[in-house]
Image (cartoon, rainbow, N blue to C red):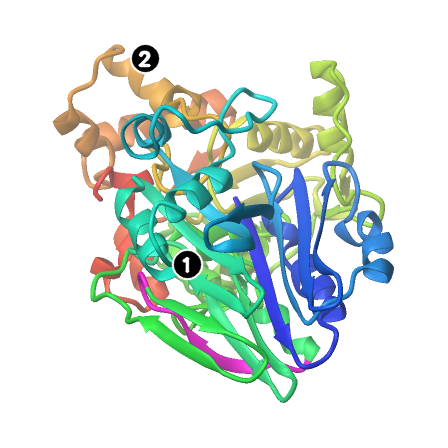
Amino acid sequence: MGGFFGVASKEDCVFDLFFGTDYHFHLGTRRAGLAVYSKENGFDRAIHNIENAPFRTKFLDEFESMHGCYGIGCISDYEAQPIHVRSHHGSFAITTVGKINNSDEIVKNIIGSHTHFFEMRNGEINPTELVAAIINRKENFVDGIRYAQEVIEGSVSMLILTEKGIYAARDKMGRTPVVIGKKDEGFCASFESFSYLNLGYHDYKELGPGEIVVFDENDIKTLVAPGNKMKICTFLWVYYGFPASSYEGISVEKMRNNCGAFIAKRDNVRPDCVAGIPDSGIAHAVGYANESGVPYSRPFIKYTPTWPRSFMPPNQSKRKLIAKMKLIPIHDLIEGKRLLLIDDSIVRGTQLSETTQFLYDCGAKEVHIRPACPPLLYSCKYLNFSRSNSEMDLITRRVIAELEGDDVAPEILAEYSDPDSERYQKMLDKICEKLHFTSLRYNRLDDMLEATGLSAENLCTYCWNGKE
C-alpha cells in the first residue's frame, strides 16, 4: 500500500509537504520520498529507506535543505518514488498509488521494444516509472493520464509535479481516494483527508472516479470530469485508513464503530470483556461494547514509543519473538477472564493465533475471536495490500483446500463466501480449530457494507466474494 501528499503554495511548501507526507506513515513500511520544484533551483528529490526508522528522522536533512513552492511526497510499501523524468513534456516528478497487473503486456505491446526501464531489487519494473512511460506516449499530460487509466489493469491514482503546478488524478474506478485541501497560501492534494487539517487547510473537494485536476498556488481546474461508476476499496475503512480520515464523507472511526455494533447484534456469547487488537481493531471493539453492554477492556497494550517499525532479524523464531514483544499483558485483566477480541481481519492467521496463545499463557479462560470483515477468500487485484499474490497464503484457502482439494470450482468458492451455507460454517469450524480459538464468528458482508452507509454497488468487495 502507500499514500501521497502534494502542495502548491505562495510560500515555501516544504514544511507542509514534510508533515503532510509524514501523516501517511501508517500506509507504508519500506520507502519514502520527496520532490520539490523552485524557479531558482529547479527540481530536487530525495528517497530513503524507512523500514526501521520514522519518516521524520530520515528526512530531517531534506527538511532543512529542500526549498520550493511546489512539491509532492509519498510513503510506499513497494517501490522507491517519486521518480524524476525528463521527456517531451519537459521535466516532471510523479508518484502513484495502485497496482499494475499487466505490466509485461504494456511494455511489449504499448511501450515498444526500444524502451528500457530500471529494475527494482526484485527484478520487477518500477510501476511508477512505467506509468510515466505510458503518459509520455501522448502529446500532453491530460491525454497521457487518461491513457494510463485506460490501459492499466488494476488501479492507479497519481500526483505529477511540473514547473507550472501539480496534476492530481484518481483511479478511473475510484478505488483509492484523492482529496483536495485549501488555505490562503495555496492548495494541497492528499490520500488521507485528515493529513492537512493541522496544517491550516480546510476540505475543498474529493476527486471523483477518474477525475483529473491541475492546481497551483492560486487556482485549481478540473480537466477531466469524474465518471459515474465507483468501486472504492472497502478495506480502507476496515483496516488501512487512519481513524481520523473520511472517505466519500464516511469517517473511518464511525464505520468501525458500526461494524462492531453489527457483530454484537448477531453474537450469542457473553464474555467478561471485549477488546480490540491494536490499533485498527480498537474502534470495532468500542462499537461492539457500546451495542452489547459488555465492558470494553485493554487486557494488553501495544508498546509503540520505540517501535515505529519492527526490526526483523533473518531468523524466523527471532522474528516471531520481536513481533510479540510489542504486546504487553495486563495480567489482572486476563487471568480467569472470558475475553472477546476483535481484529480488523484474519489473513494468514499466524499472528492472531500467537496472540490467542499469549492470552491463554497469561491465564485467560476463553478467547473468542470476531474479525471485523468477512473471510478473505481472494488476493486483491487492485491494490498492493501484500507483496504475496498467492491465495494459498490465506488461511481460508488453505482450509478449503483441505476440505475440497486443490482444484475448487468457482461455484463452490461462492458457497464458502455465503455466511448462511453449510460450507461456510465448516470453514469457520476448521479455522477455529486450527488457530485454537474458543469460538469464531466473522462479520457478515452485508452488515459490513451497511456499516459504511454507502450503496453496495459503489464498494469493491472482490477480496471477500470475488465479484468485480
**Above or below: residue 382 compared with residue 104:** below
Residue span colored magenta: 200-210
Residues at marks 2 and 1 touching, judged by CB atoms closer than 8 Å:
no
Left or right of 4: which side holds 292?
A: left
In the image, what residue occupies the spot 27% across and 15% down?
403
In this orientation, does residue 273 appear? no
In the image, what residue occupies the spot 72% across and 22% down?
319
State the SS at label 1: helix
Which residue lies under the disc numbered 1? 259
Left or right of 465: which side holds 9?
A: right
Kind of residue sitting beneath label 2? Glu
Is 298 within the magenta? no
Left or right of 127: which side holds 118?
A: right
Is 202 within the magenta? yes
Which residue lies under the disc numbered 2? 402
State the SS at label 2: helix
Please tell me which residue lies in front, 47 or 308: 47
Kind of residue sitting beneath label 1? Cys
**Above or below: residue 402 compared with residue 43:** above
Numbered badge on residue 398:
none
Left or right of 219: which side holds 80?
A: right
In the image, what residue occupies the spot 34% across and 55% down?
139
How crowded pointer 1 is (Cα within 10 Å; few <14, some 14-19, many 20+) is rated as: many
Report the residue that reaches farthest toward the bottom.
184
How crowded pointer 2 is (Cα within 10 Å; few <14, some 14-19, many 20+) is rated as: few
N-terminal-most mark, 2 or 1: 1
As measured in the structure, the alpha-carbon distance from the residue carrying label 2 to the one carrying label 1 is 30 Å
- Residue 185 picture location, percent across and down: 65, 85
